[in-house]
Image (cartoon, rainbow, N blue to C red):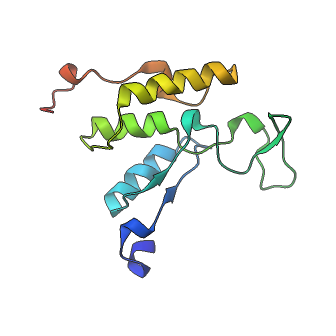
Amino acid sequence: MALDAIPNPEKHIAHFHTTRGWGLANVLAALQAGMTNYESCMGGIGGQPANFVGGVPVAGTGSYYYKDPNIVGLVSTEDMVVMMDEMGIDTGLDVDKVLEIGRMVERICGRPLRSESIKNGRIPKELSGRDW
């Protein structure tokens, strides 16, 4: 494990893709392992392997690339921040502002993005049963 070789979690950045829908499960496992820094992108649109020509995603070449260039991406920032917030983890981010920016990025891209939180929002604090 990375933390065995370099035990300071501040020296690591966890980077997970959403290709098979496992991104947030990997974030949870990394949280449980003690990781503290995460890389993500709004709407899950960033990360490799991705090729863009004239601002439009296009398929790459070789077996490493996804067949559909619209499914590339890292864990959605919105989903990760909402998940951590609902777990009681203080990210230092304004969750509602993150969701607002996610919806703005979706409008700019002109297509639905891979963020469940953009579509479904978050659990209202008063309904969560948690003492925040």
Percent of width and height locating residue 76: 52, 38
When the figure is inspected, residue 48 is found, relative to residue 100, above or below; the finding is below
Q: Residue at x 57, y 32 (%)?
A: 43
Residue situated furthest left in the rendering: 131
Percent of width and height locating residue 85: 30, 37
When the figure is inspected, residue 120 is found, relative to residue 18, above or below; the finding is above
The answer to which quarter of the image holds residue 58 is top right
Residue 120 visible within the image = yes
Q: Quadrant of the C terminus?
A: top left
Left or right position of 83 against 78: left
When the figure is inspected, residue 29 is found, relative to residue 54, above or below; the finding is below
When the figure is inspected, residue 80 is found, relative to residue 115, above or below; the finding is below
Residue situated furthest bottom in the rendering: 5
Q: How many marks?
A: 0
Q: Quadrant of the N terminus?
A: bottom left
Q: Residue at x 33, y 41 (%)?
A: 84
